[in-house]
Amino acid sequence: MLSTSKMPLPFRHLTSTKQLTRADTDAILQVAGEMEKVLGKGGDDRLRGKLLGSLFYEPSTRTRLSFETAMQRLGGDIVTADGLQFSSMYKGETIEDTMMVVGQYTDIICMRHPEQGSADRAAAVCPVPFINAGDGPGQHPTQALLDLFTIEKECKKLDGIHITMVGDLKFGRTVHSLSFLLGLYKDVRFTLVSPKELMMPPKVTSFFEEKKISFAQTEKLEEGLDADIVYMTRVQKERFEEVKQYEALKLKYVLTAEHLKGRKIVVLHPLPRVGEIAPDVDPLPNAAYFRQVRNGVVMRMALLAMLLGKA
Ligand code: NCD
């Protein structure tokens, strides 16, 4: 067990951005700033002897590789399992039993799983610190934290930010997690651009209403371009019951260089993109999505170090 005095965060598991306070995000952003310097020097050895269990039961490139990169940049090691069909869960093992088992091998676990709520079930029994790396259409807190870090770096502020979120706001867990997080800051404004079928769910809009956070909903991308940030998202094919429905909605919004002419708006995307941002945006200074990717390693270094009491 970690001694509480060595834990800079008031929790042991990270499953949702709803558990975070402003004091937590301030501390995390500060450590991330320090980790950026550590990464710039190629890393250090503070997690030597520590083992990360990296469990991915749903496809991932960035999240998985950046967790594993972060662990190794801090001198730690990893053991991994991926693909439900290759794991004991396929034989019928419960999430709880998997945690009890992998928790005997490792010092910290990150898990991605297709079921919403799986992260809370895992954390409830996990004998070592647990990090949610995406639970179906539920939450993706580490992505939201790296988005927050990116917004602060790109815009030099968080209070007063106007952010436009575009695309699949219904199934996109990254926009859910980021909305709750930005709700901790002052005078943040949201413009939500989506087709009617993919609107932001009530779990988020009722949070906005409750906290008196200003938000506007529209189907027109053009109405969202007068903001500090435009956060593009992929339509989440894997969450649709019918492929036809997905096909009809998949490329409703495509951001091009033409949209950005004369604008300073910063373009973010959790990636992978599948056509929502035209390649002619890539060379523009507005395009921050590959800088955002690097920040993913930095943020995960910060979280691993903090949850292991080595910040
Ligand atoms: C996102 C995810 O998995 O929710 N990707 C990521 O973690 N970088 C977004 C997506 O898959 O569309």
Image: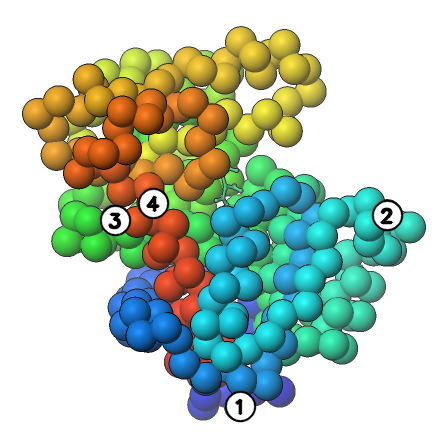
Q: How far is mark 2 from mark 3, CA to CA?
A: 39 Å
Does dot 3 land on a helix, a strand or a loop?
A: helix
Identify residue type, mark 2: Tyr
Q: Nearer the viewer, mark 4 or mark 1?
A: 4
Residue 258 appears in view = yes
| Front of the two marks 2 and 1 | 2
Whole-number angstrom distance, CA of label 3 to CA of label 4 = 13 Å
Q: Which residue is mark 2?
A: 90
Q: Residue at x 68, y 15 (%)?
A: 242
Amino acid type of the residue that numbered disc 4 sits on in the rendered structure:
Phe
Q: Earlier in the sequence, mark 4 or mark 1?
A: 1
Q: Quadrant of the N terminus?
A: bottom right
Which residue is denoted by mark 1 in the rendering? 3
Number of labelled discs? 4
Mark 3 and mark 1 residues within 8 Å of each other at the beta carbon: no
User: Residue 114: x percent and y percent?
Assistant: 67, 42
N-terminal-most mark, 3 or 1: 1
Earlier residue among tags 4 and 2: 2
Q: Which residue is mark 3?
A: 151
Label 2: few (<14), some (14–19) or many (≥20) C-alpha neighbours in 10 Å: few
Q: Is residue 214 visible?
A: no
Which residue corresponds to the image point at 72% horizontal and 58% vertical from the top-left?
81
What's under tag 3, amino acid-wise? Ile
Image position, residue 286 (x, y; %):
20, 36
Q: As rendered, which of 76 and 209 lies closer to the eye? A: 76
What is the image's colouring? rainbow
Q: CA distance from mark 4 to mark 1?
A: 37 Å
